[in-house]
Image: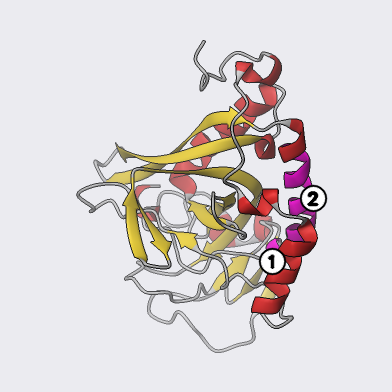
């Protein structure tokens, strides 16, 4: 069995302990991390717009790879890895076809339970008159299968919060409907191996796929790189406890570019 094979549940997945020395947020005291965030943001709370986001390329891209923002500009990478400190299900509804930019959704849900917005919006009128309203997602017509002709008009997504080496804050990856099954399977395989998702280092790559109509899209493919030792895992838990109350509010700010493949 290889170090990345988690199809058979064995203790710790048979994984070697990974070196977590490059993870700055895990090598510093939590007080140092909180002071750094507080000083740089002048006491403001972290919002969904503060975190770096990695965008999944569209199906029209010639090559599927991550464009990772850095202080010196964007760097293309075949794979990104880090510690998955949190993940959460969200929903967002953009009526009509997305044409680029960062237009806000007509309705969104940060918890996949309640949505808030204008659920009656259309492609011709994405911001209709009327006050936004709160609605149970399971009762919303846009969340029903077939509401967009094939799948759900309101897209279910998973926000993945990945703490990378050399960073004090997590990077957000949005897994669109086409990648939900692969992410879920990976998390279940970790559970079968007796591992929590924040006890390992995970790498995410992009794989070219096509739906039944031949429309190509990028599938997010996770794999485990190695497990953390008990000390590093405990630091991750403390880090999670510190950031989770703020990260719970993070939702999608731009639609996944591969929704047409769902």
Q: Which quadrant of the structure image shows residue 33?
A: bottom right
| Badge 1 or badge 2: first in the primary sequence | 2
Q: Magenta residues?
A: 233-247
* Residue closest to the far bottom: 129
Q: With 38 as the anchor, is 227 left or right in this view?
A: left
Q: Residue at x 50, y 54 (%)?
A: 174
Which label lies toward us, 1 or 2?
A: 2
The label on residue 63 is: none
Label 1 secondary element: loop
Pinpoint residue 76: horizontal percent, then vertical percent. 31, 53
How packed mark 1 is, by other alpha carbons closer than 10 Å (few <14, some 14-19, many 20 or more), is: some
Give the residue number, with chain letter if any, for mark 2. Answer: 238
Say if 4 sits above or below 38 in the image. Answer: above
Q: Residue at x 54, y 57 (%)?
A: 171
Q: Which quadrant of the structure image shows residue 98?
A: bottom left
Q: With 104 as the anchor, is 235 left or right in this view?
A: right
Pinpoint residue 125: horizontal percent, then vertical percent. 43, 82
Q: What predominant SS class does the magenta segment belong to?
A: helix
Viewer-nearest residue: 150 or 172: 172
Pinpoint residue 13: horizontal percent, then vertical percent. 63, 19
Viewer-nearest residue: 160 or 154: 160
Q: Which quadrant of the structure image shows residue 12?
A: top right
Give the residue number, with chain letter if any, for mark 1. Answer: 249
Q: Is residue 245 visible?
A: no
As for residue 245 lying within the magenta part, the answer is yes
């Amino acid at each position: 069995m290889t170090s990345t094979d988690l199809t058979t549940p064995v203790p710790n997945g048979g994984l070697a302990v990974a070196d977590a020395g490059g993870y700055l947020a895990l090598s510093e005291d939590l007080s140092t991390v909180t002071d750094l965030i507080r000083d740089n943001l002048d006491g403001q709370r972290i919002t969904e717009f503060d975190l770096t986001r990695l965008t999944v390329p569209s199906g029209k891209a010639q090559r599927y790879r991550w464009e990772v923002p850095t202080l010196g500009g964007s760097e293309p990478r075949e794979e990104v890895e880090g510690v998955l400190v949190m993940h959460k299900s969200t929903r967002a509804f953009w009526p009509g076809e997305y044409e680029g930019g960062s237009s806000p959704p007509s309705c969104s849900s940060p918890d996949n339970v309640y949505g808030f917005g204008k659920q009656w919006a259309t492609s011709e009128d994405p911001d209709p008159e009327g006050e936004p309203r709160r609605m149970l997602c399971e009762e919303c017509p846009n969340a029903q299968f077939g509401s967009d002709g094939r799948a759900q008009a309101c897209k279910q997504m998973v926000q993945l919060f990945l703490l990378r080496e050399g960073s004090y804050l997590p990077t957000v990856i949005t897994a669109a409907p086409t990648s939900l099954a692969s992410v879920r399977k990976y998390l279940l395989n970790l559970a079968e191996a007796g591992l929590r998702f924040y006890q390992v280092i995970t790498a995410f790559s992009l794989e070219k796929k096509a739906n039944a109509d031949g429309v190509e899209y990028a599938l997010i493919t996770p794999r485990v790189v190695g497990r953390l030792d008990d000390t590093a895992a405990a630091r991750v838990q403390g880090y999670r406890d510190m950031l989770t109350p703020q990260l719970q509010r993070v939702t999608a700010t731009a639609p996944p570019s591969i929704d047409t493949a769902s």
